[in-house]
Image (spheres, rainbow, N blue to C red):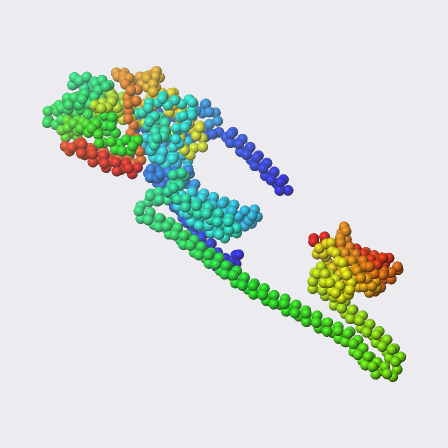
Amino acid sequence: MVKKRLRTFLIAILVCCLVGTFYYTQKPVVLTIGVFAGSNWNVPSPDSGKIIDNAIKRFEKTHPNVQVKYVSGILKDDYSAWLSKEALDGKLPDVFMVLSDDLSTYAKVGMLESLDTYMQTDPDFNQSRYFSTTLNAGNIYDQQYALPYESSPTLMFVNKTLLEENGIEIPNVNWTWDDFYAICEKLTVDTDDDGEIDQFGEYGYTWENALSSNGQALFDEKSMKSTLQNEDVYSAIEFVRKLNLLNRGQNVTSEMFDKGKVAFCPMMFSEYRTYKPYPWSVKKYSNFEWECLPMPAGPSGYNASQMDSLLCGISKMSSKKKMAWEFLKLLCYDETTQESLFKYSQGVSVLKNVSTSKNVTKYIQEDAPLDSSYNLEFFDDMMEQAITIKKLDGYDQLYSMADSEIRRVIGTNEDIESAMQNLNDELNILLEKQ
Amino acid sequence: MIQDIKKYNVWIVYVCMWLFSFFTVWYIAIVMYYTLVHVTQSGYASDFIKNISTLSNVPIRSFYIAVFGFIGLFCFVSIRKKIRFFSRHQIIPILIELGLSLLIMKNISFSATCILFLIIADSLLYVDKPVDRSICIILVFLAYMLSNYGYLSNYIPMISFQEYLSVYNSKTQGLLLGIEVTLSNLNIVLFIAYIFLYLQKQMDETQKFAALNVELKRLNNQLKGYANLREKMGETKERNRLAREIHDTLGHTLTGLSVGLEACRVMIDKDVNVTKAQLGILKESAKRGLTDVRRSVDKLKPDALERYSLKEALDMMIMDYQKLTDVTILYLCHLPLVNLNADEEEIVYRVVQEGMTNSVRHGHATKIYVSIAQADNNLIIIIEDNGQGCKNVKPGFGIHHLTERIDLLQGRIRYYGDKGFELIVEIPMRRGENNG
């Protein structure tokens, strides 16, 4: 009796399992992704959604039983809050974009799946196709938590018209601090002789730019120690102070740059891409011609600029991680997607050799105004040299502390060495708490 | 058991522990739940995520898992007694309870460990075997030691209660945390009270057992006294009976004899012949007296069977008989003679008694062989003698009576008088029936 009942029970379970498996395999798999509308670089970008839509179309074609869904219309400003809310509700998308500011938080709290094993075991994946710098942007706490989707390096914008008017040649791509300073010195003059300087060398060149191009950073990511107690740091700060002194106390504003009164201004590549072509070119910088260059190299560094990347990762809670990895690869590793970045977005590809491909050249030339041309030959070198600042937990506090102190030091005659030593100690105390 | 618990208030404390544990779990879960709702609805989600150290899987679901898990635990404890399998393996339900409570605690980020007190209380009440109970308590205790957010957050992703509270201002934080601490403390106090009462109950029980033991010893002694008294009373009764018998038979006969002999002494000088005749009568009377005495003695003897086992009774009877008469009795018994029914014992005793008496009385034998053996399922008694025997045995009253009794037991009696006298009795044994 008992045996018979047990047998019936077991058969019932078996049938349930079979039916369940059948249902499960036949049901279309829904892969959710988290993206935001618009550009990551805070520039107008009406078409950026097309890249994702095209990628989804292609993914659904190669994976017949899969539907890829996303919530559309989330603005970049709301994206972090939205994603956090989804995480708290347990509805984290399988694949989602990660702003570089959020990477450390998401990795720390366990929202992101570590990609190391996927990268090592997937035979189709060759990580040397990435610029080491872009790939490194998704690496935190010694693990690859996200892949870069698009990047935007900081470039030096040159007011070509202003330089030409003053008989100065545009520097070559390997220019140095000395070249930079010499041009600035020449251009910082009082043109209308009213006793006030009204033409300037640079606007917005900060101590961070100087540190990066002199091979320095606020702190070392491996040892988690502040690295400000260093001759190269001192010389970088000294250089910024020198540049500032040229202005003799005059405050340079972005408005002056827009009016064509400033020769150099560091800007993101995305901005260059946005405002160079028509119609946006009408809105800004319309009265002068301009060009972009890598940042000037310091005595101990390269023409290195800072770079910001938009990352993309897989949810740790996802139940379809393998498929999520496939989709992630389609976004971040697929050449077609990466090429289309140049067409629809303002960032640049994170993969090597994409920016010089035929398609990309075509896209860029389509955009370019008739009278100018893009010079992207230095591009790959610049990307390899770019510096990504890892925004670790507590970075904001660290940064604001360093920033205010260094700005103060630059504005005074104080001894840089001793000030940096003090700051170094203070930062170390903060870092130890991390 | 329930009576005892009720009596000692342990039960009330136990119920209170359940109530307050539930309240604590509910409180923590609901604070967490509403904090999450508050955080997600008012757009603080990304700040909240930045401030926490790890994110649990589906934080919003924790509330339901914790509360329904607790209700599940309660239901399990309630129905546990009805499942027979668990009463044999009492350690298993405790382990299930431990697992459930760990699940509940995980979902409230190990902020309330009071559930483990419940499990300890439960295993004290429920598990009977001391070894199992110790194992359970050690396991739960280990779980209690390790159920600490600090250790476990490194392995299990979860958001601590303090991290939830960090979204509120310090005043609210203080209040919410205060309530949590109060509830935890209350649970600890209840647990201490429970343990205190439980120990008291155990101690009382031990004392009660000791008292019962003393009482038992006293009663045992009393019983021994009664047994002695009863034996003495039996002896007295026996003596009285003996006295009565002697009085009734021997006394009567001796009185008659003494009177008759006195008359003979007076008469012998006058008339010798009459006196002779009178003496003949007296002799007959003395013989009758002797017979009466024998009968009395015979009547007395079976008492031996009442007082002693069959084997002892037989031994005694044979020894006595040898002493009384000059007959040599060779007695052999091939089986232990235990587990016989009362009627069987009686018949064995009677057969031996009657056989020996007959041998002496009628056969004037000097040697009697008594053997008791077993063949198949029959008890066989053989009594042989070297006496005169007789060609045609006329069964007397004794044999007749025996035959009737043996027939009742569906036994068989045979006797041969060719060469001495031989009496063979077979009685089917019902030993098997008796042993069940």
Q: Nearer the viewer, residue A432 or A319?
A: A432
Q: State the image coordinates of residue B187 (x, y, percent, origin top left).
A: 41, 52
Looking at the picture, does residue B133 appear above or below residue A11? below
Number of marks: 0
Front residue of this view, candidates B120 and A383: B120
Residue B26, can we see it?
no
Q: Place residue A38 in its image quadrant.
A: top left
Q: Is residue B158 above or below residue A342?
A: below
Residue B385 lies left or right of residue B237; in this view the side is right
In screen coordinates, is A429 left or right of A70? left
Q: Residue at x 81, y 56 (%)?
A: B424
Residue B2 pos. (x, y %): 52, 56
Q: Give the answer, above or below, for where B70 lies relative to A356.
A: below
Pick whichever, B435 or B295, lies toward us.
Answer: B295
Instruction: Give me the residue at 53% from left, 33% from top.
Output: A20
Which residue is pictured at 82% across the width and 72% down the height?
A: B287
Residue A317 location (% of width, % of height): 42, 34
x and y, in percent, of residue A85 in the image: 37, 37
Location of the C terminus of chain A (image quadrant): top left
Q: Residue at x 41, y 27 (%)?
A: A118
Q: Nearer the viewer, residue A49 or A173?
A: A173
Please determine whether, in this image, residue B408 is positioned above or below residue A110. Answer: below
Where on the picture, by quarter, is residue A368? top left
